[in-house]
Amino acid sequence: MISRKLMLQMTCFSLSATVLQAMADNTPPAPTFTVGMGAQSAPRYSGSDQRHWLVAPVIQARDGAFFFDSLKGVGYDLQADNGLYLEHTLGYSLGRTDRNSTWRDGSNKLKGMGNIDATMNTALAVGWSATPWLSFEGKATLPLTDGQGVHYQTSVTVLPVQNDTDTVALQSAALFGDRRYMNTFYGVSREQSDRTNFAPYQSAGGFYGVDSSLTWSHQFTSHWGGVVSADYTWLDDKAGNSPIVVKRGGTTYNFGVLYTF
């Protein structure tokens, strides 16, 4: 299943456009139900120099403040007239495996590192839509069923094009993680080092990278729409110095076709 956040951006973007339009018109959006297919070309894991393709169905439903997304989870969002908003979701992360996988992060190059378990998580985002084309957001994601640590991001999103058929979004986000998160995904314990060729590595928490994306969504008809996005992630020293990181910069491409009832 496609689990990376860029696919979530891609498939949820039509809902974001609907919400922004509703804010501009002061009218609540009508309930929607969307199905589609998405494809993604991405690094096998954060820091990998290998790539793979993922394909998965997409299901979305929204009724007022409440929504369900087959990739993002279930949640609600609240918005004030001054542009402030809050979003709370209950979702999941598929973790990582130490072998090549067609549905989750992982690579044979990580053999001996062991698996990072899938986990339920909860995410809380607080943001401000300063204008219909500019927004700022801070988000924290906390695991609920496994102690994998907490990661955060702060982002700014600009919509230079937004009309009845096309929306273009530029987003840049600073990435942060606590010590446990950093060492779960980028650390190498002595036990893992003994089982692999990787040297031991431990990282402090804090800023670890930047993620920038460009997304274009196009509405072909009142029901059919398509989305294309490209995302570039760069890892700073806290993550980039890890021996499992072969390539600090990685690009992810997303494609999707959606039908909204």
Image (cartoon, helix red, strand yellow):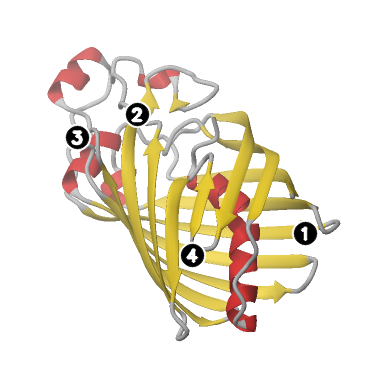
Q: CA distance from mark 2 to mark 3?
A: 23 Å
Q: Earlier in the sequence, mark 4 or mark 1?
A: 4
Mark 4 to mark 1 CA distance (whole Å): 21 Å
Q: Which residue is mark 1?
A: 218
Q: Earlier in the sequence, mark 2 or mark 1?
A: 2
Residue that badge 3 annotates: 201
Q: Which is more N-terminal, label 4 or label 2?
A: 2
C-alpha gap between disc 2 and disc 4: 27 Å
Task: Locate residue 108, reporting x and y percent.
Answer: 43, 17
Q: Position of residue 184 (x, y in %)?
A: 24, 35
Q: Please, which residue is most extreme toward the right here?
A: 221
User: What crowding class fits label 1: few (fewer than 14 Cα within 10 Å), some (14-19), or many (20 or more)?
Assistant: some
Specify the farthest residue to the left: 190
Question: Height in image: 46 above or below 138?
Answer: above
> Is the residue 194 above or below the residue 183 in the image?
above
Three-letter residue code for mark 2: Ala
- SS category of the residue bearing label 2: loop
Q: Amino acid at mark 4?
A: Ser
Assign a secondary structure to mark 1: strand
Reading the image, the residue beneath label 2 is 118
Image coordinates for residue 55, horizontal then vertical, percent? 64, 30
Q: Residue at x 64, y 66 (%)?
A: 18
Give amino acid for label 1.
His
In the image, residue 101 above or below residue 79 = above
Whole-percent x, y for residue 174 in the image:
38, 62
Q: Nearer the viewer, residue 204 or 229?
A: 229
Alpha carbon distance from label 1 to label 3: 45 Å
Element class at badge 4? strand
Q: Is residue 158 left or right of residue 256?
A: left
Mark with earlier residue (4, 3) = 4
Q: Which residue is mark 4?
A: 172
Q: Residues within 10 Å of mark 2 (few under 14, many from 20)?
A: some
